[in-house]
Image (spheres, rainbow, N blue to C red):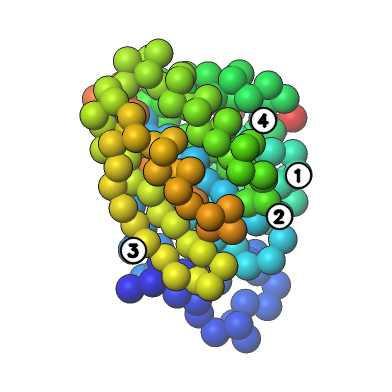
Amino acid sequence: MSITEIIPAESLTGTSPCRQFNDAARQALPAIKPSQVWLVELPVEGAPFAPACHALDSANVVIYDRGLENAVAEALPLGGYAEPAAEAGEAVAARCVRFARDGWSVARLSPASLPQRERMRRVQDFVDELLTAGVSGRLSVSILAEGADGIEEQLEARFDDLTTVVASYPRDTRLAIVIEAFPTGIAARLHAVVANGLAG
């Protein structure tokens, strides 16, 4: 089943664009688990990307570019936690990795319109941070891809091949990268984050 199966438009009046995706479409996506990091591209406007909506609905912590603030505010569920990313890329990756090490599921949302060089730099920042944190290069990583024509695929890649695999996708292909960074991570410490919406 397509991961972007859409319910009839007439039933969407007054709802977030992410409400377009029905339960069956969401169930076709991997479950979001503790200590996972999701790197997801979210369109600034236009049709949403199912994995981005899934991450906004389910991740414990959402870190997003400020240009995505409106899209995040529309889709973040009541009680969800999201904060804008700091300007320095490496600092953002490090913060996400710290949350994941503490047992949180983390979604890092980037605009789908980033140039390829910036897309690759962000992926490389996460690769570097996770390798430094002791993640094995043999770890299996899931990549969900959706092109401009709506064709989707899900594939598995080795973590140490991640940048090469991402570089092989055309820039108009939206990606979601799922990294089960610390599968034996401890339970999330609830005092580490205050819930109740957008921070900063």
Q: Residues within 10 Å of mark 4 (few under 14, many from 20)?
A: many
Q: Element at badge 3? A: loop
Residue 28's mark? 3
- Is 162 placed left or right of 15 in the picture? left
Q: Between disc 2 and disc 1, whose residue precedes? A: 2
Residue 67's mark? 1
Q: Residue at x 69, y 66 (%)?
A: 46
Q: Between disc 1 and disc 4, whose residue precedes? A: 1
**Which residue is denoted by mark 2 in the rendering?**
44
User: Is the C-beta separation of discs 2 and 1 under 8 Å?
Assistant: yes
Looking at the picture, does residue 182 appear above or below residue 69? above
Q: Residue at x 45, y 48 (%)?
A: 168
Type of amino acid under label 4: Ala
- Is 63 placed left or right of 176 in the picture? right
Q: Quadrant of residue 38?
A: top left
Q: Depth-wise, is mark 3 or mark 2 nearer the camera?
A: 2
Q: Between disc 3 and disc 2, whose residue precedes? A: 3
Q: Residue at x 59, y 63 (%)?
A: 48
Residue 162 at x, y = what percent?
A: 39, 37
Residue 29's mark? none
Locate the N terminus by quadrant: bottom left
Type of amino acid under label 1: Gly
For the residues labelled 3 and 1, the Cα–Cα distance comes to: 28 Å
Residue 114 at x, y = what percent?
A: 67, 45
Residue 68 in view = yes
For the residues labelled 2 and 4, the Cα–Cα distance comes to: 15 Å
**Which residue is denoted by mark 4 in the rendering?**
85
Residue 193 at x, y = what percent?
A: 55, 25
Type of amino acid under label 2: Val
For the residues labelled 3 and 2, the Cα–Cα distance comes to: 24 Å
For the residues labelled 2 and 1, the Cα–Cα distance comes to: 7 Å
Locate the C terminus by quadrant: top right
